[in-house]
Image: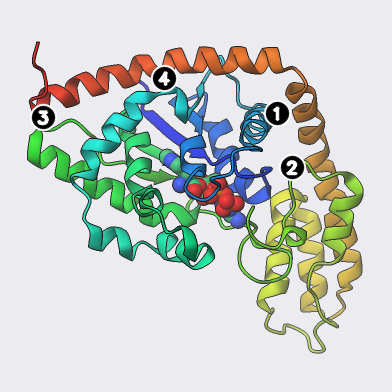
Amino acid sequence: MQKEIVVSGIRPTGNLHLGNYFGAMRNYVRMQEEYNCYFFVADWHSLTTHPDTKELRNSVLDALAENIAAGLDPEKVCLYLQSSIPEIAELYLYLNMMAYKGELEKTATFKDKVRLQPDNANAGLLTYPVLMTADILIHRALYVPVGKDQEQHLEMARNFAQRFNHRYGELFPEPQAFNFGAALIKVPSLDGAGKMSKSENQLATLYLADDDELIRKKVMKAKTDAGPTETNSEMPGYIQNIFQLMSLVSEDSTVQKFRDDFNAASIRYGDMKKALAEDMVKFITPIREKAQAIRSDEAYLQKVIKYGAEKARESARKTIEQTRELIGLNYF
Ligand code: ADP
Ligand code: TRP
């Protein structure tokens, strides 16, 4: 049986963090055995918000090294850079004819980003979901492992695929968000507000590149309070967040112990954070060390980039040929 096709991308806009790991990369690693996977570094996408490209090359290589360190095997998956595949830009052009101004302006991420950079509300930002759709449809992927924040983009991708199929003929499957386990994951920030993210509060986000002392410092600063005064109290959101983080990296029995302590109103948050910090250190250190070793071997990374580009272009070329044929752009 043919393996189902999977595509996902991460923007190289800073070091990867736990949200990226649990929302996206962990699923990539698990999918690489059973699916035909295409994973890429979305360097074109990063230009919508980061026009200054001094750090771009560095960030792209960091992202590649961190993905490999987290367990992706460039022999098993196709690992490439978005900008290596010009066919994506061509498909983006066709899909732009199917995307309407009104729906693009309503996209939550567009509105957020315009708020963050009011002086640079560029057309690339507006059509971000169209480029993302092209990334996915170029390999005719069915599954897209992403975090919850990308659901709206995927809904738009399904609409654009449908419109294309309807106008020119069946070519594209309708891609779906994918996560092992029932729900898409949102890794909360340590300050009790929102999610871990590259662009927001850096001290409330744990990066895969953080050293042991920094991890401990950030975890110990996580928002807590004096603790419940009555048994079986309702748990405040910021405490739920700490439990959620703990359930990602600690043994079930550890989480259960602190849950019991909370319900008994005897919990000591200082102890809980110390336990969480040590489990985070245990989790992040091997990934960080492996990423550093891979990152220092630029010749190897260049080989990965070249090999990935060849494999990805082979698949992209087939899709573009069929797209041109269906639209009627096959003149010879
Ligand atoms: P960021 O939001 O930090 O800029 P990206 O937008 O590059 O990160 O996201 C890359 C991937 O990581 C996406 O699939 C996204 O859904 C996932 N992701 C990012 N932050 C989180 C988070 N806090 N929880 C779960 N998934 C996340
Ligand atoms: N938009 C995604 C993000 O911000 C990154 C991305 C770009 C992507 N193209 C994609 C994810 C295609 C999955 C598939 O995180």
Give the distance between the C-alpha atoms of the residues marked 1 and 2, in whole angstroms: 10 Å
Give the distance between the C-alpha atoms of the residues marked 4 and 3, in whole angstroms: 23 Å
Question: If you read the primary sequence from the N terminus, does the residue marked by circle 1 or circle 4 appear first?
Answer: 1
Question: Looking at the image, do the residues carrying marks 4 and 3 touch, with CB atoms under 8 Å apart?
Answer: no
Name the residue type under label 3: Ile
Which disc is residue 208 wearing? 2
User: Is residue 232 placed above or below 212 in the rendered structure?
Assistant: below
What kind of element bears circle 1? helix
Name the residue type under label 1: Ala
Residue 297 appears in view = yes
Question: Looking at the image, do the residues carrying marks 1 and 2 touch, with CB atoms under 8 Å apart?
Answer: yes
The residue that label 1 is drawn on is 69
Residue placed at 92% from the left, 50% from the top?
A: 213
Residue 96 drawn at (x, y percent): 24, 44
Residue placed at 55% from the left, 54% from the top?
A: 185
Quarter of the rendering occupied by the N terminus: top left
Question: If you read the primary sequence from the N terminus, does the residue marked by circle 4 or circle 3 appear first?
Answer: 4
Within 10 Å of disc 2 (Cα), the crowding (few <14, some 14-19, many 20+) is many
The residue that label 4 is drawn on is 312
- Judge from the rendering whether residue 111 lies leftward or rightward of residue 210; answer left or right: left
